[in-house]
Amino acid sequence: MNKGQFIVIEGLEGAGKSTALETLKECLTKQGIDFIATREPGGTPLAEQLRDILKHYQDEAITAQSELLLMYAARSQLVENVIKPALNQGKWVLGDRHDLSSRAYQGGGRQISMDTLNQLRDLTLGNFRPALTLYLDIDPVKGLARAKARGQLDRIEQQQLDFFKRARAVYLDEVTRNPQCIKIDAGQSLDDVQQSIRKIVTNFLHKPSYDY
Ligand SMILES: Nc1ncnc2c1ncn2[C@@H]1O[C@H](COP(=O)(O)OP(=O)(O)O)[C@@H](O)[C@H]1O
Ligand SMILES: [Mg+2]
């Protein structure tokens, strides 16, 4: 049996990732493809506990280094215990965020060096990579306004605008370096975003890469 494919959706708060995930699910369901959906941080019992800490812990300041390590701890649990087993069973995996989020948020936002991020990526993921990443690009002012309209902001969503501007700059830089990563203008209407996603997924279904 062919291995499944790992497709990731990335972007800032309020970019429309969770909304896009639903569109992706529809596309795969129509094709009769068996899939699971995951989110990061989270997706296993331990990783969900780490998610809760990362988003809501108030009792003491979380250092940038601890935040980084907790993110990678959660990622390791998810990749080894859920994502790889699913792919090996031929299921596709749709990820709401993955490693690129750490490069953007902990690298760009928290200004941790790319050397450190590369080392942690090597340690945690080896050469495991998504086959396709859809990056939903949004002006952080617009994204945060959408996120605020959705409800109370969590610990990370409460960072200053500059944090998100730096995160966006990393996302944009990574998109230019990685042909597996496709940028979608998430400032468009929901209809237009959905249409872009369907087009990209249709192309991918015709020509997926099996080389991760
Ligand atoms: N293209 C869009 N235009 C306008 N509103 C959108 C668009 N995409 C998503 N939204 C809305 O913005 C909010 C945040 O979207 P969501 O998918 O939860 O973002 P994320 O998961 O990236 O934080 C939701 O209320 C959603 O309905
Ligand atoms: Mg979401």
Image (cartoon, rainbow, N blue to C red):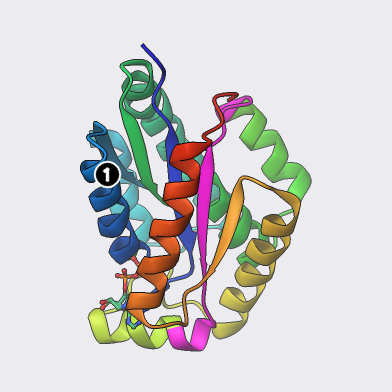
Q: Residue at x 58, y 56 (%)?
A: 182
Residue 141 is situated, as x and y percent measured from the top left of the image, at 49, 88
Position of residue 22 in the picture relative to residue 79 (left or right): left
Residue 193's image quarter? bottom left
Q: Is residue 144 magenta?
A: no
From this viewpoint, is residue 16 visible? no
To which residue does mark 1 refer?
49
Q: Secondary structure at mark 1?
A: helix
- Disc 1: CA contacts within 10 A as few (<14), some (14-19) or many (>=20): some
Q: Quadrant of the N terminus?
A: top left
**Residue closest to the far front:** 206
From this viewpoint, is residue 6 visible? yes
Position of residue 175 in the picture relative to residue 125 (left or right): right
Residue 196 is situated, as x and y percent measured from the top left of the image, at 45, 65
The correct choice, above or below, for 40 with respect to 108 in the image is above
* Ligand 2 contact, mark 1 (Cβ < 8 Å): no
Position of residue 137 in the picture relative to residue 93 (left or right): right
The correct choice, above or below, for 138 with respect to 30 in the image is below
Please report the bounds of the magenta region as a residue range.
Answer: 125-142
Q: Nearer the viewer, residue 196 or 93?
A: 196
**Residue closest to the far top:** 1
The quarter of the picture showing ligand 1: bottom left
Q: Residue at x 34, y 19 (%)?
A: 85
Residue 26 is situated, as x and y percent measured from the top left of the image, at 23, 52
Q: Quadrant of the C terminus?
A: top right
Residue 18's image quarter? bottom left
